[in-house]
Amino acid sequence: MGLFNFGGKKNSSVVGIDIGVSSIKVVQLRKRKGVAVLETYGEIALGPYSDIKLGVGQSTNLPAVKIAEAVTDLIREANVTTTRAGISIPFSSSLVSLISLPALDKSKLASMIPLEARKYIPVPISEVMLDWFIVPGEEKQTPVSSPEAKEGKKTPPAGAAKRIEVLLVAIHNSTLNKYNEIVQATKLDVGFFEIEIFSTIRAVIEQSVTPVMVLDMGSANTKLYIVEYGVVKASHVISSGGQDITQTLSKSLSISVSKAEELKRDFGVSDAGLNKDADTINSKEIISSGLDRIFNEASKVLMQYQKKHNKNISNVILTGGGATLKGILPLAKNHFEVEVSMSNPFTKVESPAFFEKVLKEIGPEFAVAVGLALRQLQEEG
Ligand SMILES: Nc1ncnc2c1ncn2[C@@H]1O[C@H](COP(=O)(O)OP(=O)(O)OP(=O)(O)O)[C@@H](O)[C@H]1O
Ligand SMILES: [Mg+2]
């Protein structure tokens, strides 16, 4: 089993399993007449599996056996009927770097990359599983200040080396061991592990010639990726997420964390349904300021990227459970100078029409799981 290898039989169901810090999500798909069809989906909170029982929405750091237990429970509860799975690996357990190398043939690159990687990976190369692929269409001429170049001749001067961009991906062996333990304990037939960014990209981004920014609003963190031609060009982690908003609500209003989580989910930052109760009025302000912090940091990263690369980012896509907060979209639109949209991963799969509304609402939370299941289907042909 590797990051980029797979195998399998045709025409059977597949399941994408997204193990987040606060909950696990599954999406089961099947291919019918060349189309991906949704069979089932589900989610289970991880808080209750931790020793100090945490509430829904809170982030955990569980050992493999506990995660395996939760996966098994979720598979049963969501009526997942296949063992053929793709599993995501947290972005935080990976190192993704875009590096520039001379345009050599693949075998030369293969021996050069582990050496090059030492510059980018802060642990011994023997401790990581390394993978890489060449970014398409990025061959560049290195400017060389030769006399020919100065004279403006069109032919490349001798010594001008073509460069390519290579996406380098490293995952620590201890992470892979943990995931292999989960797989063994759950008896899943896992085709691949994929870093969650790549699953998200597959599920939420349409072909776009201009860069887009994806904001994955999780529990402890908000992950931000800038994607161009399907390739991650930059990434950033904002150390604040849905959990922080809930905890601030709980402290400010002197209510339990579970009550705060409920209040947040019931009202969010929308005025709809807001009653005159002081708590709900204050909660809107508290949630808004939590979101302000996240959006301000994201906006800074966006502007820095635009300036550095002299390119406009066309769109910000909100995804992750935190993006399902009621009323979040208009608030986000106020923060960014570019268009903001909500991810809607279930549009990539076929489902009964009466499901559409609910799938649109919960979609952002399931983006990673949808992306994983889509890849598993593609790979099975
Ligand atoms: N309806 C909702 N309204 C507001 N917030 C919500 C809603 N549903 C979930 N959340 C919040 O989303 C967060 C969890 O998001 P998500 O499931 O994407 O995180 P995760 O995948 O477990 O985390 P990570 O990706 O960092 O591992 C929680 O903080 C939760 O409070
Ligand atoms: Mg997540």
Image: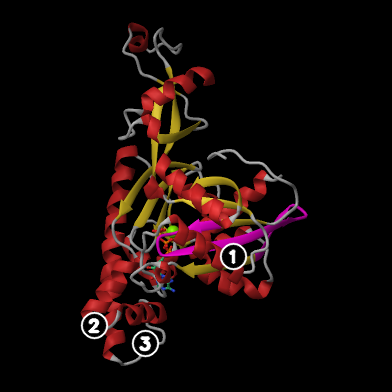
Q: Label 2 vs label 3: CA separation?
A: 16 Å
Residue 253 image label = 2
User: Can you say whether 329 is above or below 12 in the image?
Assistant: below
The location of residue 82, given as percent across then percent down, is 67, 58
The residue type indicated by label 1 comes to Ile
Predominant secondary structure in magenta?
Answer: strand
The location of residue 355, given as percent across then percent down, is 63, 73
Q: Which residue is painted at 52% across and 59% down in the image?
A: 367
Q: For ligand 1, give the image quadrant.
A: bottom left
Q: Label 2 vs label 1: CA separation?
A: 37 Å
Label whose residue precedes the other's in the sequence (1 or 3): 1
Tags 2 and 3 touching, CB below 8 Å: no
Q: Which residues are magenta?
A: 17-39
Residue 127 image label = none
**Is residue 20 found inside the magenta-colored segment of the image?**
yes
The residue type indicated by label 3 comes to Leu
Q: In the figure, residue 328 lies in which quadrant?
A: bottom left
Q: Nearer the viewer, residue 258 or 301?
A: 258
Q: Is residue 72 left or right of residue 51?
A: right
Residue 241 seen by the camera: yes
Q: How many marks?
A: 3
Q: Is residue 165 left or right of residue 276?
A: right
Report the residue marked by disc 3: 274
